Image: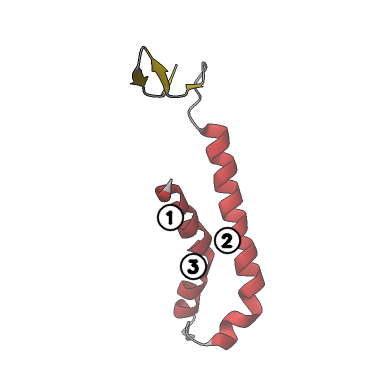
Amino acid sequence: MLRLVFEQIALFSLPFILFAGWLLLARRSPLDGAEWKPQWTRLVLAGLFVVVVSLVMTGLTGERHAEGYVPPRYENGRLVPGHFR
């Protein structure tokens, strides 16, 4: 679960990293707030778009289990772990 959160944070930050790279290539300072201020909304929307698209694609192409998940249960006094059928 933590890996998924880190992946989504990395995907959200991708437009910001690309914009900073573009500023470096254009020989502008990526540390100057005046360069970022007009683009802030666009970068946030682009980051959210990338995250939503990645979640949708994961949902569409993720592995499916026909029988579903069987939760953990007790049988004859022993704990049987959960599993997919």
Answer with mark 1 or mark 2, whichever residue precedes in sequence: 1
Q: Nearer the viewer, residue 74 or 54?
A: 74
At a point 65% along the width and 68% down the height, the residue shown is 42
Answer with mark 2 or mark 3, whichever residue precedes in sequence: 3
Q: Residue furthest left?
A: 78
Q: Position of residue 53 (x, y in %)?
A: 59, 47
Alpha-carbon distance for marks 2 and 3?
11 Å
- The number of numbered badges drawn on the structure is 3
Alpha-carbon distance for marks 1 and 2?
14 Å
Q: Amino acid at mark 2?
A: Gly
Disc 1 versus disc 3: nearer the observer: 1
Q: Name the residue tied to disc 3.
A: 18
The image quadrant where one finds the C terminus is top left
Q: Residues within 10 Å of mark 1 (few under 14, many from 20)?
A: few
Residue 32, label in figure: none
Q: Position of residue 2 (x, y in %)?
A: 41, 50
Residue 47, label in figure: 2
At a point 50% along the width and 78% down the height, the residue shown is 23
Q: Name the residue tied to disc 1.
A: 6
Alpha-carbon distance for marks 1 and 3?
18 Å
Q: Amino acid at mark 3?
A: Leu
